[in-house]
Amino acid sequence: MFDQYNRLINYLRISVTDRCNLRCEYCMPAEGIQLMSHTDILSYEEMFDVVKVGVSLGISKVRITGGEPLVRKGIVSFVEMLSSLSEIRDLGMTTNGILLKKFAHELAAAGLHRVNISLDTMDPEKFRQITRGGDINAVFRGIEAAQNAGLHPIKINTVIRQSREEPDAVAVKEFCEKNNLEIRYIHVMELSKGEFSVVEGGEGGDCANCNRLRLTANGMITPCLFSNRKYNVRELGAEEAFNQALSNKPACGTVNEVGQFYNIGG
């Protein structure tokens, strides 16, 4: 399907939860967040029905995000549901890696193709500070498990403040080179201020070639991360929500004053 700017839209990012087992300083406030009500969150069956409609319209790439997707119960079964759709040629997940050792082989067996794992530093104490309590060794174990499970390629998402030459980013790059991992540099973004840039080593932030829509855990299809526009699949029906999101996808992102990274999926 094409939007009004003749961009081919074939990529759907699904935020399955706004919950997370970390509290990264650039993603969540220290005092915590107001979580979505369980009654507002779509069941996996509802999400699957939305994806089937998306696939019928031309979606061929799906990425599962959060929050942290691995904290939602039944996530492996959801991956298996999605992998049953032969039209989905690229099925990935973005995770912080903390629980990946537990789930990597099950996810691969269920049909997940690949993972992106967040890692901003190689310093255990700095990692604990950035994530407000996370154990970097759990991430390393998750990466190893993903490699052993055959999830490939494994991409490392590294948030940078100024440039890829920052000491932490350089250290992560060296780690990636030694372990056959791909690195992506993501500049710190501010939704409410409209501050974003193209992901180095990736496709995010490139408005002229954007090919994605997003489905939030509470059933909103959003046409752009940096936009307030959202369309409720429960109220409109999935096909109409897709059509409205497609028709109203902006040429370029501006600001988002109603959402956050933890409940849209980044």
Image (cartoon, grey):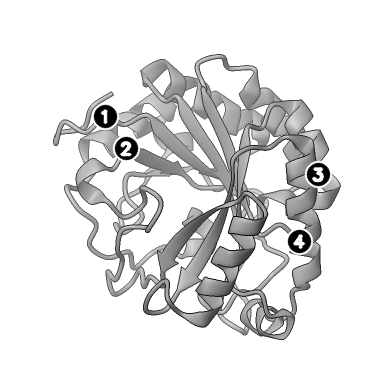
Q: Residue at x 73, y 34 (%)?
A: 150
Q: Are marks 4 and 1 in contact (CB under 8 Å)?
A: no
Residue that mark 3 sits on: 103
Residue that mark 4 sits on: 140
Q: Quadrant of residue 103?
A: top right
Quarter of the image that includes the N terminus: top left
**Label located before the other in sequence (3 or 2):** 3
- Within 10 Å of disc 4 (Cα), the crowding (few <14, some 14-19, many 20+) is some
Q: Secondary structure at mark 4?
A: helix
Residue 235: x %, y % from top left = 43, 36
Identity of the amino acid at label 1? Leu
Decide if residue 73 is in sight here: no
Q: Secondary structure at mark 3?
A: helix
State the CA–CA distance, disc 4 to disc 2.
Answer: 31 Å
**Residue 153 falls left or right of residue 70:** left
Residue that mark 2 sits on: 211
**Label located before the other in sequence (1 or 3):** 1
Front-most of residues 172 and 18: 172
Residue 16: x %, y % from top left = 61, 46
State the CA–CA distance, disc 4 to disc 3.
Answer: 14 Å
**Label located before the other in sequence (4 or 3):** 3
**Label located before the other in sequence (4 or 1):** 1
Q: Residue at x 85, y 48 (%)?
A: 102
Q: State which mark lies toward you, 4 or 2.
A: 4
255 vs 85: above or below: below
Q: Secondary structure at mark 2?
A: loop
Residue that mark 1 sits on: 8
Identity of the amino acid at label 3? Phe
State the CA–CA distance, disc 1 to disc 3.
Answer: 33 Å
Q: Are marks 2 and 1 in contact (CB under 8 Å)?
A: yes
Q: Secondary structure at mark 1?
A: loop
- Within 10 Å of disc 3 (Cα), the crowding (few <14, some 14-19, many 20+) is some
